[in-house]
């Protein structure tokens, strides 16, 4: 696979950073949406496992992440994520006419991808793969903190806190966790406004996800300490055309965990 990167201009006139991994022969595309605090470069591992599948891979840095525009860990409206995803999708389409495009979203990217399928109803997406979607946190936020946040979001919407992510909760693979820790493009910020927008969007997705008609693969690690694996169970009970896989003993990032060989085998089975 040949890897390259570029910047495209969003509908807001701001730059979105896009990475591409292109095989010599391509018969389908996967467009990937990353999680909170990370960036598109962390999905290079997909090119290793999918290099023989004739799949072109595209990934972009969300606003407030990686090399794209925006204040780290902050956004004014959740729809801005969907707008940027749509802009990237249209750019991908220019290079890949009449080729099926599959949407992949992990964690926050899973929530964004589900929201996109519900709200935009794009005919450009063939099917979707949703990994560890941010629907239900593994640990509930204390009610007093939630109440404080609801007040402060109106006073200091852009104020950012540490997202309190424990790096060792990402995977059981020490090398992967170390790479995350040393990655200069990774950040640990989340604003009051972003947290509020995420919570509002979760409610909307749970209510409306029954509208999704596309074929979807939902998967999650059973020992995820960040996002509860109940998330995919909630979704699968409402999305008729979904296939759910729970990876026993796996943490938050199945594609980077010790069981990743099995994870990619399931992904390959789904896309083929």
Image: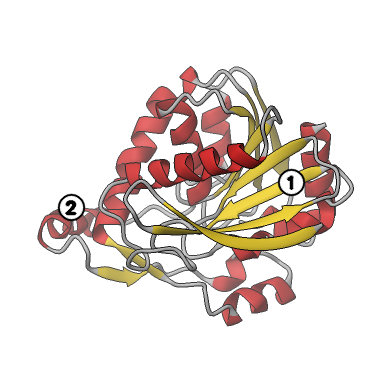
Q: Quadrant of residue 153?
A: bottom left
Write down the residue under mark 1.
Answer: 56
Write down the residue under mark 2.
Answer: 150
Q: Position of residue 24 (x, y in %)?
A: 85, 49
Is 80 placed above or below 61 here? Answer: above
Q: Quadrant of residue 71?
A: bottom left
Q: Nearer the viewer, residue 135 or 80?
A: 80
Q: Position of residue 105 (x, y in %)?
A: 57, 45
Q: Quadrant of the C terminus?
A: top right
Q: Residue 170 has which mark?
A: none
Please name the residue shown 80% across and 35% down the image. 27
Indicate left or right for 105 with 196 as reference: right
What crowding class fits label 1: few (fewer than 14 Cα within 10 Å), some (14-19), or many (20 or more)?
many
Among the two numbered marks 2 and 1 on one chain, the one whose residue lies closer to the N terminus? 1
Q: How many marks?
A: 2
For the residue labelled by badge 2, is the local secondary structure a helix, a strand or a loop? helix
User: Which residue is situated farthest in the left direction here?
Assistant: 155
What crowding class fits label 2: few (fewer than 14 Cα within 10 Å), some (14-19), or many (20 or more)?
some
Q: Position of residue 162 (x, y in %)?
A: 36, 72
Q: Position of residue 3 (x, y in %)?
A: 73, 62
Indicate left or right for 4 with 9 as reference: right
For the residue labelled by badge 1, is the local secondary structure a helix, a strand or a loop? strand
- Between the residue at mark 2 and the residue at mark 1, the CA separation in whole angstroms equals 42 Å
Is residue 9 visible to us here?
yes
Please name the residue shown 25% across and 53% down the image. 76
Tell me the mark number nearer the camera, choosing from 2 and 1. 1
Q: Quadrant of residue 163?
A: bottom left
């Amino acid at each position: 696979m040949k890897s390259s990167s570029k910047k495209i201009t969003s509908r807001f006139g701001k730059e979105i950073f896009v990475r591409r991994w292109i095989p010599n022969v391509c018969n389908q595309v996967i467009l990937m949406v990353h999680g909170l605090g990370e960036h598109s470069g962390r999905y290079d591992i997909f090119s290793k496992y999918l290099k023989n599948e004739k799949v072109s891979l595209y990934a972009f840095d969300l606003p407030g992440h990686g090399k794209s525009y925006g204040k780290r860990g902050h956004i004014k409206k959740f729809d801005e994520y969907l707008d940027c995803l749509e802009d990237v999708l249209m750019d991908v389409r220019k290079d890949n006419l009449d080729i099926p495009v599959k949407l992949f979203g992990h964690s926050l990217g899973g929530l964004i991808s589900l929201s996109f399928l519900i709200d935009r109803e794009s005919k450009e997406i063939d099917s979707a793969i949703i990994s560890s979607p941010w629907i239900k946190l593994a640990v509930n936020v204390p009610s007093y903190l939630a109440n404080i946040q609801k007040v402060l979001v109106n006073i200091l919407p852009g104020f950012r806190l540490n997202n309190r992510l424990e790096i060792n909760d990402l995977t059981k693979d020490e090398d992967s966790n170390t790479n995350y820790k040393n990655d200069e493009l990774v950040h640990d910020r989340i604003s009051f406004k972003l947290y509020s927008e995420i919570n509002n969007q979760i409610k909307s997705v749970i209510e409306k996800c029954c509208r999704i008609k596309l074929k979807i693969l939902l998967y999650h690690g059973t020992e995820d300490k960040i996002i509860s694996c109940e998330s995919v169970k909630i979704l699968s009970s409402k999305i008729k055309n979904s296939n759910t896989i729970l990876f026993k003993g796996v943490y938050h990032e199945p594609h980077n965990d010790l069981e990743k060989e099995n994870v990619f085998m399931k992904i390959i089975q789904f896309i083929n």
